[in-house]
Image (tube, rainbow, N blue to C red):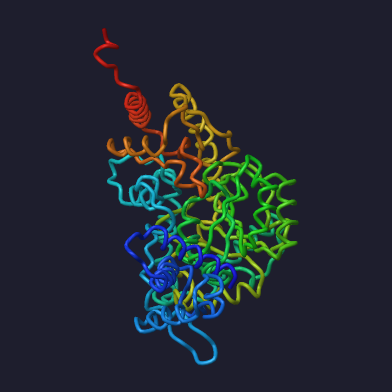
Amino acid sequence: MTNCMDELAHTVERELIVDDRGTTRTEALMNAVRSKIANRALGSGDRLPSVRRFAEVMGVSPSTVVEAYDRLEAEGVIRARRGSGFYVTGAGLPPVALADMGSPRERNVDPFWVSRQSLDADPSVLKPGCGWLPADWMPNAALRRGLRALGRVDDTILADYGSTRGSLALRRVLLGRLADEGITASADQIMLTASGSQAIDLICRLLLRPGDTVLVDDPCYFNFQALLRAHQTRIVGVPFTPTGPDTAAFEQALDENPRLYITNAALHNPTGGTISPQTAHRVLSAAAARGLAIVEDDIFADFEPSLSPRLAILDGLDRVIRIGSFSKTLSASVRCGYIAARADWIEGLVDLQVATNFGGPSPVATELIAGVLAGGSYRKHMDEVRQRLTRARKDAMARLTPLGIVPWIMPRGGFYLWCRLPDGHDSAVIARRCMEENVVLAPGNVFSVSQSAASFLRFNVAQLGDKRVFGVLRDAMKSDAAAKRPSRSRTDAG
């Protein structure tokens, strides 16, 4: 309640200072409450400060507060409960508009802009800023064999809803993969979801409430931020280093009383960094001391040449929740994700999935994925992909270096390069200029909570096979440099 009072007081003071049209204190109080409801700092059912307390903090008479509350109640914004106080009704809550949440941004540094341009792009558009492999890199022959095999499956797989935890066959495959990493888990500790994004959404529904604080890496996968905004949480960024989150900053951020930390421990998106054993132990110790839950998104695990440290392995699925999906390695068209966690958390997540999706993912999708993973072709496919990515990474660097674009680190695997532009270039400006030439880039501040990555671009090396990308990028940088160059006057020109 103290934080609510402080924020309301600040809003009232700002209202009185900014508005020079004679705003009364009653109107300022009303506007402050409306503002907190509009930006969802106050939600439906939240209790407002008592009349006496609000009056004391604001230095106004109780009658002024009573008048403000009475007028808000007449508007239907709040309601009184006898002997209890005043509560937000929800009538003043606007629809959630994610693009409007947080500070206004130029559309080209908005993650929704990047996603829409990539997802809706014409086949002729080049997409080095997207987050998936080209179609001809995927195991299409194995997928076609699996699709043909579906013609022989039981009718229930073709016609019925998915079970609440998802296909047992696929869960057994995943349990075997966890065991290979050294994670001992049972069938009641794993569930399938419609996608990796839905996995995070369900976890947020289970563990978070509006206004809760969540830690993310800075920079981090931009859709983490989008999902957290949808859940009306407060996002705090922790600087990310080549060996994981900055541990001193992480420990300091725990003073914000976060409920959750979301990260990629291996082949981090967008930087490509991988957590070190020392960092992993320190993060887990600090999180355990505060009772902090951690979501470890391991979607890039199969791109690693060898297994690196994992928070879930060290923690044993106690406070760490492992999530993943098959969109990057098998098919983004056949969507399926998974969650591995404590049995009691899985139980709650299953109920939420029933409520929001009426069961697990499509049995057709899970049967297809289980068949491909269980076959011997998948391991060979990933070996070939890792080799192709190694070559693509080297080729990309050979073409980016002459442009003055250098990698932050050289990752040990995966398909991302987090690169710094030469001094003076803003990646958002470059992305806009390249988009005019049908090349989609991913500018740095899309990924940064603190908006401190304006000089970075994330490249997908698998999508850099077309040499036109580098010509468009070079021309965009030249054009940007020319625009920054001061024009010469007639006198200067002689």
Question: Would residue 200 be seen by someone viewing this image from the given angle?
Answer: yes
Give residue 25's position: percent from left, percent from top. 42, 70
Give residue 314's position: percent from left, percent from top. 73, 56
- Comparing 80 with 360, the one in front is 80
Residue at screen point 50% across, 92% down: 82
Residue at screen point 45% across, 21% down: 402
- Comparing 210 with 390, the one in front is 210
Give residue 297's position: percent from left, percent from top. 57, 56
Placement of the N terminus among the 4 image quadrants? bottom right
On screen, 389 above or below 73? above
On screen, 324 above or below 358? above
**Residue at the bottom extreme of this rendering:** 82
Image check: 346 left or right of 99?
right
Image check: 159 left or right of 261?
left
- Comparing 265 with 37, the one in front is 37
Residue at screen point 47% across, 51% down: 222
Question: Would residue 167 be seen by someone viewing this image from the given angle?
Answer: no
Give residue 123's position: percent from left, percent from top. 29, 44
Placement of the C terminus among the 4 image quadrants? top left
**Residue at the left extreme of this rendering:** 490
Image check: 375 left or right of 100?
right
Quadrant in which residue 276 is drawn: top right
